[in-house]
Amino acid sequence: MKKKKTIKIKNVAISIPIFVVLVILALLVLVPVIWMTLSAFKPEKEIISWPPTFIPQSLTLENFVDVQDRINILRYMLNSVIYAGGTTLLAVVVNSMAGYAYAFYDFKGKTGMFLMTLATMMVPFQVIMVPLFLVVFKMGMYDTYWGLIIPRVAVAGSIFMMRAAFSGIPKELAEAARIDGLSEMGIFWRIMMPQVKPAVITLVILSINGSWNDLLWPMIVTSRTEMRTLANGLALFIGQNTIEYGAAFAGALISLLPMFILYMVGQKYFVEGMASAGLKG
Amino acid sequence: MKKMMKYWNKPSRSAYLFLAPSVILLILFSVVPLIIAFGLSVFDVSITMDSANFIGLDNFIEAFHDSRFLNSLKVTAIFTGLEVPLQVLGALAVAALITKNNIKNKFFRAVYFLPVICSATAIGIMWKMILHSNIGFITAALQSMGLGKINFLNTPGLTIFVVSFISIWRSFGISAIIYVTAIQQVSASLYEAAEMDGAGKIRQFWHITAPSIRPTFWYILMTRFAGALQIFDIIYITTNGGPNYTTESTVTYIYSRAFSSRSSMGYASAMSVILFVIIMVITVLMYRKMNQEE
Amino acid sequence: MKKMNKWKRLVALGVSTMMVVSTAACGSGSGDSSKSDSTEKKDSKKGTTISFWNSFTGSDGDMLVELVDRYNKENEDGITVEMDISSDFDSQLSTAFAAGTGPTMMLSSSAYRFTYGDYMQDISDIFEKTDLNKEDFIQSYLDYCSEGDSLYFVPFQVVGYYMYWNKDLFEAAGLDPETPPTTWEEWQKDAEKITDESKNVYGSGISYDYPYQIAHMMQRQGGLAVTDGNGKWKANFKGNSGYADFLNMYKTMVDNGDNPLEADTDSMMSAGQIGITVGGPWVTAGLDTADVNYGIGLIPQGEAGDMNSVEVLGFSITTAASDEEKEAAYKFIEWWNSEDKEGSSPALEWSVANGFPAYTYSVQEKPAYKESEKLSVMSSANPDAPTDFIVDSSFPGINDVLNDVIPEMINSVAFGNASVDDALDKAQTAADKIVDEYNK
């Protein structure tokens, strides 16, 4: 009895400072984000004012109306969904397969191929942009959804991440499945993929998020207004010479919301992924 | 057909099948453009590639005499030195604290993830506004607390810390979440065994969690490294390299050379090659260490 | 225009080889014909669609969208202008040009002729093929758009920088709100009076990170940074007493706390925290939304004599345009400058709404133009003053001077690692290097 009590006290003594640290971090994140959110509801005059305000003195929806009036939100959002959805769907398959191969197989040229993959991560996009555009253009994919999606599917970082996730799985699991007569593809798809569900969800969220907020690639690979993504549309409020802060923040919120919902849904699956992995382990 | 299936089903061969799609896509859309871009480094050529003169290693020689390029390497090194350790270890510490799936931790995870899903542009103008030396909300709040006027974005020596902070602020959430998923994958039976041996939480972390998530640790370390050495967007939006070039990173400078003035794609490529070599050397060293450990 | 060089051919070859591999790999053998071909083969009877790229993000871009929409509805030639506003114009242009494609028409600073000149068509025949009257265009602006006998742009907007002062702050400092400074000494004195540390108010708003603003101010004191000296370009930084005066004035005001050490002074002006500043016509948009009580005037002149420095933006037609598309683009440009029954034109509307001075004599004469208070200040400048901005208007290295030389100079002065003389010497060295390149 006595022993149990001391453990409890010790736990509380540790968990309070931990909680305080977590709360401070959360405030560091939240205060600016809340400031931005509240600013989206302030008139422009109040966002740029002295002394600066945190709580809006007058609430307005004019920034949202402005965004709604000036860009075709639905069309841009549709393009963003196609771009992000298409890229992600293919990215999950392609990058998981590659990550699995690097984690589970030994083969000739493994180090070389992996280093080549890593090397692609090390050149700033701004430098390969022009040659990459030439490739896409010559393939006849300029101004098409394919041109938007295909070049963005294979990502060294994602392959690396999936490799890390698969490395955590004991190799005996594959051996056992082979004895059961499963094909290599079957092992990967039916046994291995469910094991790394949390990593797959992370990959999905990262990939969608990356394309959703991508500004430069959709800008150069498409040339028509009806091919523009939401990120492109929102960039219009940040002018060459002036920034419309209210509209820019309102736009940022509009664009943030679907991502946040997606994350909340994703988080639910993190847990489920865990539960099933736990059962087997 | 069946024979073929069988042929490819041999583990060593099916590895190539698994790799084929990514390798083809990477070669087409990353390696080929990369080789072309590197090829440009020995030419005097503009961004539209309309006329090219072979000039050998002149671009490289110029780069090593260009004080802004050398300065940008220094800035990048400082940024990386600040950002990577804080990000990689800080996120790990945070992840360890929010691993358990309870409401409280889910809330914190959601909060920390918020900046990750904001666009870089929105984050940039937001911080620019709240840290403004005159009309910034945070500046004003600190001033009213009697902490004096702090010119966050226009003080050489200080601004690089501010930019590093914004960069960590933006992405530590994703690093933490990736750690969390890795920690959660560690088999519960390992912990049970340790508990039986009477190991405390901290010892459990060092002896079970840490070794188990090593691949994830390497992944985060190496990608953060590559990312930090190529830092661009946050700097471009918040300070654009100022004040007095104290936050001008290598990629920011490469970008300005490629586009805004003199438009020298050849020179920009030469600088990228140098940066590439630096990143690659560090990465290969880390890769070898990683393989030894695994 | 220029012959295709070896390297480019090599790149093309490499790319085509990859294509063969890729089409086999991706299993999408069709659709290899490039997109630009199919858009060029538009059925002429059904009308022509032309693409139109520019970088007019922000609220003025919104007005451009409306005007283009109006043209698409009103024109009887079946022409559709498909406009694309780019938030990263240079990336979009350079990649497109590198691949041999591009828009039919674009809108850019006339300085783009130095970077993308190879991809622009000579459009000097526009005055023969349309009703546009060459005599109506102000010649000095057309000079910005030409090289030799070739015309690369038709003027669209003339951007001058002006002085803005906050009348309330003038009053609070006991100054006459209707008498802005007319000399640099007055600017400095007024700034000192207006500065109020307790309210975070600064008298003067010069940004160390705004080379255009600095260039407009600097050249009024020390003249042009690059001039034509007997057929060779020559840089004028070293020993330039006017530039030294400007830099000393800036440094003194920063040290005295009359000018903030801040990159973003525009938002401070909008927040009513700055007494006097210099900026383009777009500054008024921010001041109007913020209800700032302000005045507009000409930037004080200095030792260098009267100057009316401007940048000229214009329409240009790229080499990617077919003859038919070029003709359609001509019609659009013609429409932009033609009057309707009430005597109004899109050019006039644009000028009045956004505060850009006119580039034609006919627009200058319009009542709506004359009535505009902003424009009357802007066009009160001496019409005979030179219009060159920071360098001789035909010097191709203007961007290098603006983006490299001037920022390096002002930063080293602002952050105190160089004396004014040293900064000017360094600027001279940097400028000489650029000048040499164009003297070859």
Image (cartoon, coloured by chain):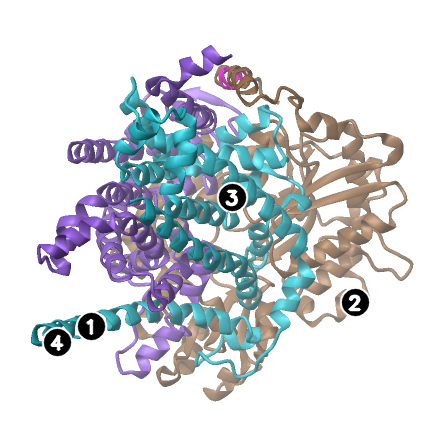
Chain colours: A cyan, B purple, C brown
Number of other residues with Cα within 10 Å of mark 4, as a class: few under 14, some 14 to 19, many 20 or more: few
Question: Does residue A271 show up magenta in the picture?
Answer: no
Amino acid identity at mark 3? Leu
The residue under the point 84% across, 35% down is C129
Q: Which mark is residue A5?
A: 4
Q: Rounded to the nearest whole Å, what is the CA distance between mark 2 and mark 4? A: 86 Å
Number of other residues with Cα within 10 Å of mark 3, as a class: few under 14, some 14 to 19, many 20 or more: some
Question: In x, y percent, where is residue A75?
Answer: 67, 51
C248 relative to B7, above or below: below
**Letter of the chain that mark 3 sits on in the rendering:** A
Question: Does residue C10 show up magenta in the picture?
Answer: yes
The residue under the point 39% across, 84% down is C199
Question: In x, y percent, where is residue B173?
Answer: 35, 57
Amino acid identity at mark 2? Ala
Question: In x, y percent, where is residue C92?
Answer: 57, 39
Work out whether mark 3 precedes mark 4 in sequence or the reverse, and give the earlier one. Answer: 4
Kindly tell me whether residue C179 is visible in this rendering. yes
Kindly tell me whether residue C219 is visible in this rendering. no
Do tags 3 and 1 sit on the same chain?
Answer: yes
Q: Where is mark 3, residue-wise? A: A216
A13 relative to C177, above or below: above
Q: Secondary structure at mark 4?
A: helix
Q: Where is mark 1, residue-wise? A: A17
Work out whether mark 4 precedes mark 1 in sequence or the reverse, and give the earlier one. Answer: 4
